[in-house]
Amino acid sequence: MSSAGAVRRGKVLLLLCVLCLLWAMPWGCSRKSEERGQVAPQETATFKGDYAALFRQIGELQERVRANPADPELRRDLVAAAVDTVERRLWVAGRGLIPSGAASRPVALQAAERAALTDAYRWVALLLKWKQDYRTPDFGSVEAAVPAVQIVHRDTSDNEVRLLVEAPLP
């Protein structure tokens, strides 16, 4: 019986050692997130619903990235503004031009909204990649599976439909 008890104590000791190693591993193997090109997680306040202001902020940052696609610092700023780590979601703006030669205004608006939604999905894919490493991929070259989005704000002008969409973080 003492032999069986020793084996059991050995197994328990081995299990405790493995658990301690698993617990300590994140500290021993971690690098600074900035070294990996990641944006440090921020405890952002929960969004309270001023979607128009959020749309303007995100839209401006996206336009800055679009105007200067080689600047990784602009991508980092966009990720920091668009990703809510507390609520595990991100926001992007999508824009679609209203076609001038459409048969009717409702058909033209519908086409523009589809284009804006497609643009938003592209931004979601880019942000999910840039959240991991804002230095790659370059703007415009991305391939990713993206979650379903929800339209939270819609704005229409004479020639454009603009959407603010929310997507869950995987």
Image (cartoon, rainbow, N blue to C red):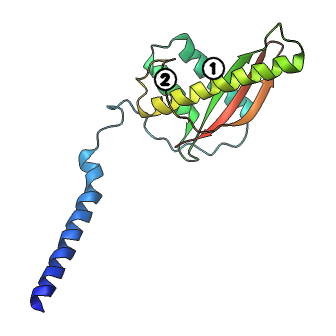
Query: Which comes sooner in the sequence, label 1 or label 2?
Result: 1
Say above or below: 28 vs 94: below
Identity of the amino acid at label 2?
Val
Q: Position of residue 114 (x, y in %)?
A: 73, 24
Residue at 80% x, 23% y is: 110
Q: Residue furthest front?
A: 103
- Front: mark 1 or 2: 2
SS for callout 2: loop
Q: Is residue 89 left or right of residue 31?
A: right
Please say whether residue 133 is visible from this viewpoint: yes
Residue at 56% x, 35% y is: 146
SS for callout 1: helix
Read off the residue under disc 2.
Answer: 142
Identity of the amino acid at label 1?
Glu
Which quarter shows the N terminus?
A: bottom left
Read off the residue under disc 1.
Answer: 60
Q: Position of residue 11 (x, y in %)?
A: 19, 75
Q: Residues within 10 Å of mark 1 (few under 14, many from 20)?
A: some
Q: Position of residue 8 (x, y in %)?
A: 18, 81
Q: Position of residue 97 (x, y in %)?
A: 74, 14
Distance of mark 1 from mark 2, alpha carbons? 21 Å
